[in-house]
Image: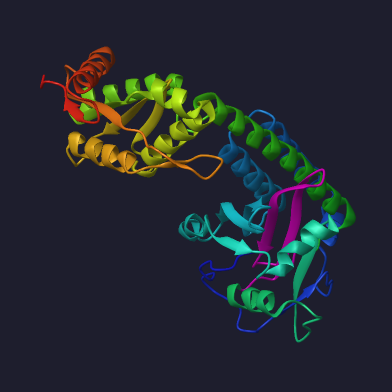
Amino acid sequence: MTAKKSPPPSAPDKAAAASPDAAAEPAAGAALEADPGLLKQRFMALLEASRALSTSLVLDEVMGLVCKGVEKAFGLTSVDIYTYSAERDEITAVWSIMRDDPEGAAKFVGTVYSLAEHPYFRRAFEQRSIVEYHAVNGNLAGADPELVAEMQEWGEKSVLEVGLLFGDQIMGLLSVSSTERPLHLDDVEKELMIAFASTAAIAIHNAHLYHQIEEQAIHDGLTGLYNHRYFFDRLQSEVARSRRYGTPVSLLMADIDDFKRFNDDYGHQTGDEALRAVAAVLAAEMRRDVDAACRYGGEEFAVILPNTAAPAADVADRLRRKIEKMTFTAADGQVLGGVRVSIGVAVHAGASTDVNGLVSDADKALYLAKSRGKNRVQMAPAE
């Protein structure tokens, strides 16, 4: 579906109405009869794309291969691929090709459709086959009015949609359209597209699994923060960036004060709750796709702040104060005490920056914070 896209340069003057599964225009099968080699070309294009799908487990690459494979095989004006969220019952455009409007395709990515508000998308999932909409003058044939209006607005002669299904699991939706000519596939072409959609669904499922495994490998199971392994990989990258560009990188090392006593007083389950709560405060205060909050080990946390505008000590004290305000409730409803954290802060920049030195300085600052009364922020001495 090409809703919300920029109209083609020359939309047709004559309004068209969408009729599902109509066949009033000359079929593409006629072109196959005139050129028997065309079917082989389409088959080879989809075969090539299927082979390419087996070489990638990166979700965005897989989506791109699906779109490009279908576009190449059928010479389409527009190809869109959506992922499906069962939790929200909506589809989201994640890849788009518009031959005449690449900028519009880029803008279209991220568009979300609720299936409750746009029920015609659901047909491809329910019918488990290709759903066709073709422009037929003066004949609505019961098509959804919104769909009709969209096809008229964008000058689409045909829209075809097929669900990307892995067993009973909906992985997404493939939608193709043509503004140049009606796109009536014969039975063999439909089987080709459905077979490719099945292959694409398997590839997308595998890419999702790979992504989940990757995420599990770099996240702490209890708190959901990045783990110790990711911390050092990320810090290495940020230190290299600092050395190259001379920008500062700050490191906060935070430790929950007297956590053993907290566990002894309230039990390990409440201790785990406290760890998750502290982690939630850290995560909520991070700049998205910039900072990194990590569980360093036990009750110790590390926060990487690349090129932070605010003084790192101010960020640390804001975190400390938010954590200090937390309280916990026992299973019987009794309000328990909270936890406090001590935070050591180190800031390096330029050619002298190195991972071991940054971690060592932040650790020393943390030790000073502990020795000077706890529940405080301590800066490491300047380089």
Residue nearest the viewer, comparing 135 with 210 = 210
Give the quarter of the image for residue 11: bottom right
Membership of 335 in magenta stretch: no
Give the quarter of the image for residue 32: bottom right
Left or right of residue 310, residue 261 in this image: right
- SS majority, magenta: strand
Left or right of residue 380, residue 94 in this image: right
Q: What residue is at 11 percent from the left and 19 percent from the top?
A: 383
Q: Residue placed farthest to the left in the image? A: 382
Membership of 171 in magenta stretch: yes
Q: Quadrant of the N terminus?
A: bottom right
Q: On screen, 135 above or below 332? A: below
Residue nearest the viewer, comparing 190 with 259 = 259
Residue 3 screen position, x and y as percent: 59, 68
Give the quarter of the image for residue 296: top left
Q: What residue is at 83 percent from the left and 69 percent from the top?
A: 21
Left or right of residue 183, residue 232 in this image: left
Q: On screen, 318 above or below 117? A: above
Residue 352 screen position, x and y as percent: 16, 16
Q: How many numbered markers are drawn?
A: 0
Residue nearest the viewer, comparing 360 with 298 = 298
- Is residue 57 visible in the rendered image? The answer is no
Provide the residue span drawn in magenta: 155-183
Residue 215 screen position, x and y as percent: 54, 31
Left or right of residue 3, residue 251 in this image: left
Q: What residue is at 25 percent from the left and 41 percent from the top?
A: 318
